[in-house]
Image (spheres, helix red, strand yellow):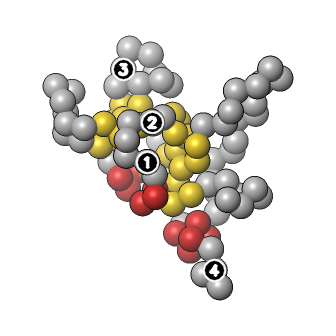
Amino acid sequence: MDEANPWRHMKNAPRDGSRILVTVRPTEQGPAEIDVAYWSRADQFGIEGWRSADSHPGQIIGYADPELKCWMPLPAPNAGGADIPAPWEGEDAEELYGSGI
């Protein structure tokens, strides 16, 4: 994993229910932001897809695939407290995939 850029393309995100950090794309309503999300199978709350309940207590947020730009694993907990990473502000897929060389 590239330590300078830990963000990864969403197509490689785990779909096993584990929680990950995601960059939510900027919209007309606001700039890009970070959220904690997980892949959920279809249930009484809706069809399968990316959801978040950690950042908005009492609400389950559903994200469409195009809304999420990239992901990274949750940072390991430590006594000093981890800094929250900044949202990925680079260009889309090309930079996330790397040069391929």
Task: Provide the residue designation for mark 1.
Answer: 14
Amino acid found under the numbered disc labelled 4: Ser
Disc number at residue 91? none
> Would you name the residue on which mark 2 appears?
18
Residue lying at 52% horizontally and 54% vertically, measured from the top left: 70
Q: Residue furthest bottom?
A: 101
Q: Is residue 28 above or below residue 77?
A: below
Quarter of the image where one finds residue 57: top left
Q: Are the residues tagged 2 and 3 within 8 Å (C-beta)?
A: no
Dots 1, 2 in contact, CB < 8 A: yes
Residue that lies at the very extreme toward the top in this rendered image: 58
Could you tell me how far apart the alpha carbons at marks 4 and 2 are, in whole angstroms?
Answer: 29 Å
How much space separates mark 3 and mark 4, taking CA atoms? 39 Å
Residue placed under numbered mark 3 in the picture: 59
Task: Answer few, some or many: residues within 10 Å of disc 2's Cα (few below 14, many 20 plus, some between 14 and 19).
Answer: some
Instruction: Look at the numbered disc 1 and give the secondary structure of its residue.
Output: loop
* 3 sits to left or right of 14: right
Residue nearest the viewer, comparing 69 with 11? 11
Q: What kind of element bears circle 2?
A: loop
Q: Residue at x 37, y 41 (%)?
A: 16
Residue annotated with mark 4: 99
Q: Considering the image in quadrants, where does the C terminus appear?
A: bottom right
Mark with earlier residue (2, 3): 2
Dot 1 or dot 4: first in sequence order is 1
Query: Which is closer to the viewer, label 4 or label 2?
Result: 2
